[in-house]
Amino acid sequence: MIKYSIYLPSNKIHNDYFASIYKDWDSERVYSQTGIISRYYASPKETSATMGAAAVLKLIEKYNIDKNTIDFIICVTETPDNQLPATAYKIHQLTGLFSHCGAFDINLGCTGFTYGLMTAYNLIKSGTASNILLVNTETLSNYLDTDDRGTATIIGDAASAFLIDKDVCNNIMKFVFGTDSTGYDKLIIKHKDDNIGQKQYLYMDGMDVFYFAINSIPNIIHEILNINNVTLDEIDLIVLHQANKTILEYIKKRLKIQDKKFYINLKDTGNTAGVTIPIALDNLVETDRLKEKMKILILGFGVGYSWCGTILRW
């Protein structure tokens, strides 16, 4: 059994909020365009660190984990509390972990869960660590530009915490990863209008991201299957980064994957960057669709452009 927890802020944002901003859109149109009904935003007092810490404490309480056994914490976020020090240190402090526990950040968003999993896997396989807290946490709502409704309407905040140990690693297959840095500036937090006097916002070239995903992801899925000598028929579930409904539907159709095998989970939480795969896995567990020993192909893709995926035996 994989031990994990999900944290969602209490501030739930329904589509009516955007209908009040964009006069030519109503709630149904927001849903038809995005596949999203609601998402969550961090409150003014919440940060990536406090949300990540909440997920960790929830995990520890849920499974009665001895904090003394935790020897590493990896925080994956593209919205750190500070440029210096790493957000992982703040989470370490807020959760009362011990001094023998290592900590660092990985600056990643959409690919963050799978890259974080690969990093934890390698630390454990090398004998460097035994019990790693993999924390993904994002507060992208702080960087939304309401002038860019295509991006503003899909983004949500969330955090997750997974305990990665030897048993988990024994059920992780080979990873496929890569980079197409021509997309470096296609999904980026930058000063508005490239004016350093302006606030920084999340900017996305939606069409370029769309073409990257539909042209690359089907081939990458085949790479993951091939490197692990697994056929698509042997996979029980495919859980991709929940970028947006249009991209996911296109990939499903192109690969001719059955609906019951290809999971789309945007409706209630939106695109939470590196936390989308953890949230999807949680929802599959809660709805009794994800059971022990199932093979799940997980693949993160996006910012960078980057991708990382593997097959996980649940």
Image (tube, rainbow, N blue to C red):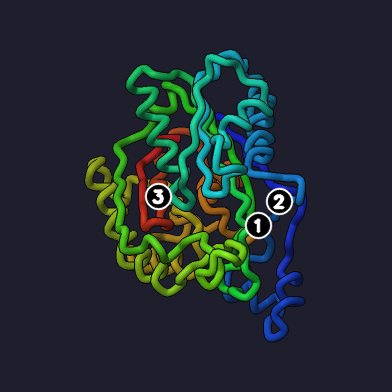
Label 3 and label 2: CA atoms lie apart by 26 Å
Marks 1/3 in contact by CB < 8 Å: the verdict is no
Indicate left or right for 7 with 312 as reference.
right
At 49% across and 50% down in the image, what residue appears?
A: 109
Judged by depth in the image, the label closer to the viewer, 3 or 2, is 2
Q: CA distance from mark 1 to mark 3?
A: 26 Å
- Estimate the x, y position of residue 226 in percent, counting from the top left: 23, 47
Q: Position of residue 53 (x, y in %)?
A: 66, 33
Q: Which residue is identified by label 3?
A: 299
Of the image marks 1 and 2, the number of the one nearer the N terminus: 2
Whether residue 1 is visible:
no
Numbered disc in front, either 1 or 3: 1
Q: Camera-side residue: 224 or 303?
A: 303
Q: Nearer the viewer, residue 259 or 274?
A: 274
Q: Is residue 166 visible?
A: yes
Q: Which mark is residue 42?
A: 2
Residue at point 59%, 65% (across, down):
197
Query: Label 2's element?
Result: loop
Mark 1 highlights which residue?
A: 142
Q: Residue at x 53, y 45 (%)?
A: 77
Q: Are marks 1 and 2 in contact (CB under 8 Å)?
A: yes
Q: Amino acid at mark 2?
A: Ala
x, y percent for residue 154: 59, 65
- In the depicted structure, whether residue 116 falls above or below residue 268: above
Q: Residues within 10 Å of mark 3 (few under 14, many from 20)?
A: many
How many residues crowd around disc 1 within 10 Å: few (fewer than 14), some, or many (20 or more)?
some
Viewed as shown, does residue 112 lie left or right of 153?
Answer: left
Name the element at disc 3.
strand
> Between tags 1 and 2, which lies in front?
1
Is residue 233 or residue 116 the one in the foreground? Answer: 116
Q: How many residues crowd around disc 2 within 10 Å: few (fewer than 14), some, or many (20 or more)?
A: many
What amino acid is at disc 1? Answer: Asn
